[in-house]
Image: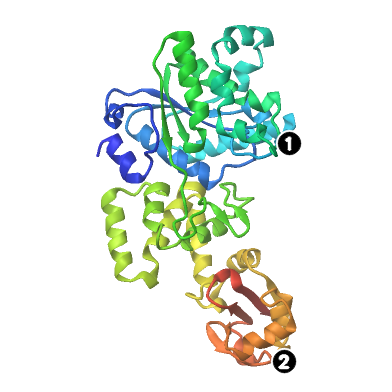
Amino acid sequence: MTLSEELSWRGFANQTTYKELTQLDGEPVTFYFGVDPSAPSMTIGNMAAAMMVKTFIKHGHRAILLVGGATGLIGDPDGKADERNLKTLDEIDANKKAIAAQYHGLFQGYDFTVVDNYDWFKGIDYLGFLRDVGKHVPMRQMVQREFVQSRLSEGGAGISYAEFSYVLIQAYDFLHLYREHGATLQLCGSDQWGNSIAGVDLIRRIEGGEAHVWSTPLVINKATGKKFGKSEEGAVWLDPDRTSPTAFYQFWINADDAGVEDYLKIFTELDKGEVDEIMAAHHSDRAARIAQTHLAREATTLVHGAEAARFAEVVTGYLTGMQPIGEADEAVLSEIREQIPAVSVKVGDRLDAALLHTGLASSLTEARRLLADNGIALNGVKTSSETFTDADFQNNRILLRKGKKYKDSALVELG
C-alpha cells in the first residue's frame, strides 16, 4: 500500500495543497508537525495526528517534531471565543519537557528531530521581524480568518494584538524550518489549516519556494456527532498521572460500535488485513466486543507500554465481572479503588446505605427503588436484599453494580 493509499484508508486525508494525493508517493521529503505546550500532556486528539505523522515516517519521509515554546507563550486563538489566559514561563517550560517526552514515547524506534520554536524566536528583534517578515503578510489575509471575524463582530469578545499575531508566528516557523532544515511540508489537524497555509504563502513570498500542507480531519464520535476524545470526566490524556493506563484502556473498551473500525485504523498500527479480520470476528459476535478489546490493547500499548496494557486488561476483567472479584490480588484491588468508589461494611449493614455512600444512588429513596426494581447486582447476581449477608462476599469482597457500565460500580469490602 502506498503512502497516499494508506492515508486515505486510515482516514488521514482531509485538505491538502497537493494537486494529486499521489505526489506523496514520490521522493522522501522533510516535514514538520507541531504541538503547543498549552497543557502538560497531549490528548488522544493529538495522538490521532501523531499516528498520521508515524505513517509518513514509516514510508520514508523525514520528520521534524516541534514543541511550540514560543507559540505556547501566546496561545492559538483559533476556535476560542475568548482571550486565553497566558501560561507562566515555568508552566511552559514544564509542559515543553512533558510534550517532548511523549514524542519520544510515541515515536520510539523511529528517526525524528525535536525542535522548539522558542530557540529561534528568542533572538529575533521586533523591528527586524516586522521589516523582514511582517512586511510580506497581507492584513486582508489575517483579518478574513473566521475566528477573527467572530471575535471582532458585535457581541464578540474582541482579540488582542498578541493573539491576532499568532498566525504570523506559526507561519515563520515554517519559513525557518524551510530555510534551516529543508522542510517543504507541514502536517496538521484540520483546525490548523489556516495557520499552516500562512506558512506556505510566506515561503512563496520571501523565498520564492514551494511548500505544502497536509491536514487530517478531526475525529468525530459517530454515535454522538461530537468531537472524539472527551470522556465523562473530560479530555483523555496521554499522561498516566492525568488519565491512568486503566482509565485509558477503559475509554477504548467502551468505544461505540459505529466508530470502532475507524478508531482501529487511526489509533493503532494494525494493517488492513488485520483490521478486516478483527471486524469480521466483531460482526459475528458484537456482544463479545472483540474490536474494542483489540483497540484498547493496541492503543494502550502504544502509549503506556505492553506491561501497563496487560495490567489494565486484567483490572478490566474484574471491573466488568469477567473475573471473580474475590480472586483479585492487592495490586489489582489498589487500582480498582482508584477507578471506582470503595466502601467498608459489615454483615448486616444496609445495601441502600452503601449505594448512597458510594454515589450509586443520590438518595435512600432512589437506592430502595433500584433494589425494588431489580436494578442492583452483587458480583453479577441481581438482588433485592435489604442487607449484606455472608453469602454475598467472595473472599470478603463484593462488586456492587448499578446497570451495565463499570463506572456505575463500587467495591464493597468486609471490614
Q: How many marks?
A: 2
Identify the residue position indicated by label 2 in the image.
Answer: 348
Q: Is residue 154 above or below residue 326?
A: above
**Is disc 1 surrounded by few (<14), some (14 to 19) or many (20+) residues within 10 Å?**
few
- The percent position of residue 205, horizontal first and vertical second, equals 47, 11
Q: In front: 320, or 198?
A: 198
Location of residue 102 by image quarter: top right
Evaluate whether residue 149 shows in this view: yes
**Earlier along the polypeptide chain: callout 2 or callout 1?**
1
Location of residue 398 by image quarter: bottom right
- The percent position of residue 276, horizontal first and vertical second, equals 27, 56
- Label 2 or label 1, whichever lies nearer to me, is 1
Q: Residue 261 got which mark?
A: none
Q: Residue 85 got which mark?
A: 1
Q: Is residue 313 left or right of residue 364?
A: left
Secondary structure under the numbered disc 2 in the rendered image: loop
- The percent position of residue 93, horizontal first and vertical second, equals 68, 31
* Three-letter code, disc 1: Asn
At a point 64% along the width and 30% down the height, the residue shown is 72
At a point 64% along the width and 93% down the height, the residue shown is 385
Location of residue 29 by image quarter: top left
- Verify CB contact (< 8 Å) between mark 2 and mark 1: no
Q: In front: 243, or 256?
A: 256
Instruction: Point out the residue furthest to the front here.
Output: 154
Q: Is residue 104 left or right of residue 92?
A: left
Evaluate whether residue 415 shows in this view: no
Q: Is residue 211 above or below residue 403?
A: above
At a point 52% along the width and 55% down the height, the residue shown is 308
Secondary structure under the numbered disc 1 in the rendered image: loop
At a point 63% along the width and 50% down the height, the residue shown is 242
* Three-letter code, disc 2: Gly
